[in-house]
Image (cartoon, rainbow, N blue to C red):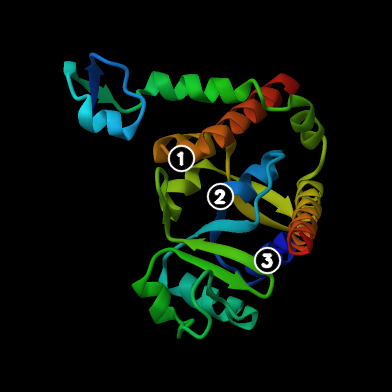
């Protein structure tokens, strides 16, 4: 696992603009902490979060199809995606 | 548009040894996600490479995304010297992979395949648990939602049994 670091810099006054950064540079505190890349448990948490949004009704529907039917469905979806892309290009050119 | 049926049928009838992986494998298992290319891991023996070259030659394979006119020699020498090829063909997008991150080569993947009846033929396809393992091992954030869907597919299949 690679180790990365991030810096926390707290200023005495509120920094609102880049100009402030240049001229209001009274630093109150700087802390340097190691920032670990996503741990395995972090990856599981992300995947579990995505799982909540998987439409199980679609999966169950697909599991009732044969493999051939699944690929036919995919090719129809491909065609639809291409049609949409073309329509989008056309709409953009008309704007 | 990729004609998955025609591509798979052609490869099987050409006696090519390959394993369907990636998005197409996920589709075969019930995924609802869109994929536009056929990913497969091919066996890197001299005989199989010769069959790949002769079978795909009529489909005018060319490097996908390469500037038009860039010389590309579709030959056994090219396949031997390279490993993974993302191609465009007259039947659509085809990724010929000598090995995949997190999974390895044909020999490493073969024990975890199922026979897939598709397009009137039968071919090898990576099974769901190994697909999940490969994607997890690759560790790419862009695969997290695909992994989630595969895990749901496995759960729903277990439920049906």
A83 displayed left or right of B75 = right
Between the residue at mark 1 and the residue at mark 2, the CA separation in whole angstroms equals 10 Å
Q: Is residue A2 visible?
A: no
10 Å crowding of disc 2: few (<14), some (14-19), many (20+): many
Q: Chain of mark 2?
A: B
10 Å crowding of disc 1: few (<14), some (14-19), many (20+): many
Image position, residue B48 (x, y; %): 49, 70
Earlier-in-chain disc, 3 versus 1: 3
Q: Chain of mark 3?
A: B
Quarter in which the N terminus of chain B is drawn: bottom right
Image position, residue A81 (x, y; %): 75, 53
Image position, residue B105 (x, y; %): 41, 53
Residue indicated by mark 1: B134
Q: Quadrant of residue B71?
A: bottom left
Residue indicated by mark 3: B7
Relative to A42, say whether B84 is above or below: below
The residue located at (57%, 33%) in the rendering is B145
Q: Quadrant of residue B6?
A: bottom right
A12 displayed left or right of B39 = left
Provide the secondary structure element on which disc 2 rests. strand
Q: Are marks 1 and 2 in contact (CB under 8 Å)?
A: yes
Q: Chain of mark 1?
A: B
The residue located at (74%, 61%) in the rendering is B5
Residue indicated by mark 2: B21
């Amino acid at each position: 696992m690679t180790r990365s670091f991030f810096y926390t810099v707290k200023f005495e006054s509120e920094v609102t603009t880049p100009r402030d950064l240049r001229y209001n540079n009274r630093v109150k505190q700087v802390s340097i902490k190691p920032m670990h890349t996503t741990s395995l448990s972090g990856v599981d948490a992300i995947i579990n979060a995505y799982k909540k949004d998987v439409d199980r009704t679609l999966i169950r529907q697909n599991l009732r199809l044969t493999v051939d039917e699944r690929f036919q469905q995919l090719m129809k979806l491909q065609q639809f995606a291409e049609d949409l892309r073309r329509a989008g290009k056309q709409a953009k050119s008309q704007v | 548009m990729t004609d998955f049926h025609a591509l798979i049928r052609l490869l099987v009838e050409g006696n090519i040894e390959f394993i369907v992986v990636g998005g197409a494998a996920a589709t075969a298992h019930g995924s609802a996600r869109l994929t536009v290319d056929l990913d497969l891991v091919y066996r890197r023996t001299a005989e199989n490479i010769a069959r790949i070259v002769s079978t795909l030659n009529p489909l005018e394979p060319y490097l996908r995304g390469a500037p038009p006119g860039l010389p590309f020699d579709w030959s056994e020498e090219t396949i031997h010297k390279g490993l993974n090829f993302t191609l465009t063909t007259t039947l659509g997008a085809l990724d010929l992979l000598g090995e995949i991150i997190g999974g390895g080569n044909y020999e490493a993947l073969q024990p975890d395949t199922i026979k897939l009846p598709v397009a009137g033929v039968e071919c090898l396809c990576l099974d769901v648990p190994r697909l999940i393992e490969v994607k997890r091992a690759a560790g790419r954030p862009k695969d997290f939602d695909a992994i989630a869907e595969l895990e749901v597919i496995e759960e729903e299949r277990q439920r049906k049994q």
